[in-house]
Amino acid sequence: MNKILENLNDKQKEAVITIEGPVLVIAGPGSGKTRVLTHRVVYAIVEKNISKESILAVTFTNKAAKEMKNRIVTLLGSMDALGSDKKAFYKDVNSYSTSFAANFPTISTFHSLCVKILRDEAEHVGYKRDFVIFDGDDQKSLVKKAMKELQIDTESFNPRTVLAEISNAKNELRNPTVYEEMIDGYKQETVSKIYHLYQKWLKDNNSMDFDDLIMQTSILFFTNPEVLEKYQDKFKYIMIDEYQDTNHAQYKLINLLSKKHQNIFVVGDDWQSIYKWRGADIKNILEFEKGYANAKTILLEQNYRSTQKILDASYSVIVKNVNRKEKSLWSKKESGLPITVYEAANEKGEAEFIISEIAKANTRDGLKLNEVAVLYRTNAQSRSIEEAFLEYNVPYRIVGGIKFYMRKEIKDIIAYFRLIQNPTDLMSFERVVNTPKRGIGKSTFEKIIVASRNQRIGVVEIISNYNKGDIAPRRLESLVGFAKIIENCKEKAKIMKIKELLEYLLKNIKYELYVKDGTDEGESRWENVKELFTAVEKYDEFTAEKSLNLFLEEVALATDLDKVDERQDAVTLMTLHSAKGLEYDTVFIIGLEEGLLPHAMSLDDESEMEEERRLCYVGMTRAKNRAHLVFARVRRIFGSTQANYPSRFISDIPAHLVDMQNQGYSYLTDDSSDKDDVHYD
């Protein structure tokens, strides 16, 4: 038997060896889709002699991309198929790169792929190659500025809502002009004005937001047939992970890339499509065969994660959905424990039940805390769980808290780096021109900004050559000193690695003195800044200028899930949306009440209700051995007391699969135990 196909089931083998033409793989949770993807890449290289560079595999998170790279390198290494320069392969796996690796498949997220393409082709869409990527905070600030410029009240139009509308427009490939042509009502008319100015300022700033990366790459391909053909011939074999999560822009991008050779392989699960709110279109996977007439469809139905009882219970929830492809999940794992449905008196009882069950499983089976997840529909639900965990000393981590790179002191340094990289970055200039304080007033700042926009010259160059007499000499001297620091750093960046550049910058702006400010909080902030030295160490192997570019791009494209440390022995708390792709021995889904799960906004919309069912299904299938569904008779949330009916999803599950319990007995208050028994010190 071919070594690559060892330990694959028949359907997995079929998916691996079907290399030519369009292929749709419907992969249930825990069915080994990553295994199929990685083995398929290796099979194409080793058995079909397809060049490594002609293979493109795309997924949604850096973490997933790195896992795929590692598996592929390991498989190729085991077959002595890495060639002579093994170091080059391992370097590619363990680093982020703005360019395509030589003699290795491109394994990437959608956004990283587009960054790589745009770094080479940005001039075709009116950008310079050293464009910067705006994060969420930068985008909100720019929207607020546009609204202020247009005299639009932020009370009447929430900047977050405006930004979401702009994001949706970009996901549909609607630039400001196209959006304006589709205006329907006063709200969209107002958003259109903001969108036009927002996008103009982005371009003037030589910046793109997250959604621009895909939209501008799609525009590049639409408007430059020769560039499109270049990448079509480069990527003759394309594989897409989590295809059910693609939006319209991602669909069009991949459709264009695969159009010439038609070797498109997509794997996903329509039952796990849960990102409609951010533009994911379930029709992309449901109607794949319509777009690719000769497509072959393969079902991966054997589950290697969950017990059969968990699979049967989750199926009873999802089967109520009309818009789905049918499949029958099965597992060789023994039938397993029934699904626990627990009725708590309130959110406090909900939390105590969770601690009770964890403590019992720890004593009985040695269950580790990092094998447990608590999942909820809304972030607000974590509060009562956190309070109880703190009271009983149960270690926990929250996915989706404040990111390291979102802290003020870190964003300050990143803004300096971005301005060094791109002296036209007005947003970064505004953030750091007075950080530390330089006595630059609002009037002085606005004069520089106006001059920069009018002359279309970077702010640093404007300051260095400013010859008007409308800025006080003392302030101008301060500005010129600031510009000199940026110019010096830009020169140093050509010869210094980023770690050296960081040290040089901090010393020149006297940031330690500024940030410490004599308080404990200041000391903590400085410790965060020092942690940056650890964060940038891995870029030392690259050339000086490249190390700065790599760092800034990886920071911009990072997600919360990329930072999850599953080795830490702590219970994981996260929303159901964040849980997809993860697995735990034991899962608690809390708040299974009408109005929470399913969410109140879905109660009168059938398509939204179907997504809520998929969300519940995703949560249940994260569990390997134990799944607990919890609801409360009364809940204090969102500033009010609610008494909701139990979720309809509970009643969907047949009685023989359920162990029904309620809060009449508490492990925590029984005479035989006390709080000390469940402390995790």
Image (cartoon, helix red, strand yellow):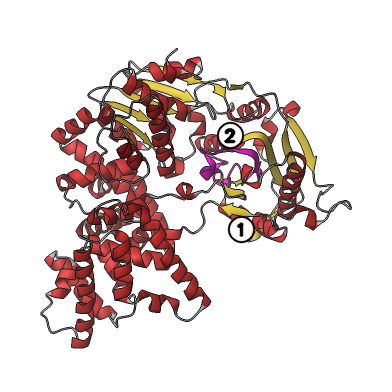
The magenta span reads 576-604
For mark 1, does the 10 Å Cα neighbourhood hold few (<14), some (14 to 19), or many (20 or more) residues? few
Q: Is residue 226 above or below residue 46?
A: below
Marks 1/2: CA–CA distance: 25 Å
Tell me the kind of residue under disc 1. Answer: Phe
Q: In the image, is 61 to the left or to the right of 357?
A: left
Q: Is residue 378 above or below residue 623?
A: below
Q: State the image quarter where residue 630 is shown.
A: top right
Tell me the kind of residue under disc 2. Answer: Tyr
- Residue drawn at (70%, 33%), measured in percent from left and top? 651
Residue 599 sits inside the magenta stretch: yes
Q: Which residue is mark 1?
A: 638
Q: Is residue 594 above or below residue 456?
A: above
Q: In the image, is 656 to the left or to the right of 78?
A: right
Give residue 617's mark.
2
Residue 670 sits inside the magenta stretch: no
Helix, strand or loop at label 1? It is: loop
Helix, strand or loop at label 2? It is: helix
For mark 2, does the 10 Å Cα neighbourhood hold few (<14), some (14 to 19), or many (20 or more) residues? many
Q: Position of residue 478 (x, y in %)?
A: 23, 81
Q: Which residue is farthest front?
A: 84
Residue 591 shows up from this direction: no
Q: Is residue 351 above or below residue 152?
A: above
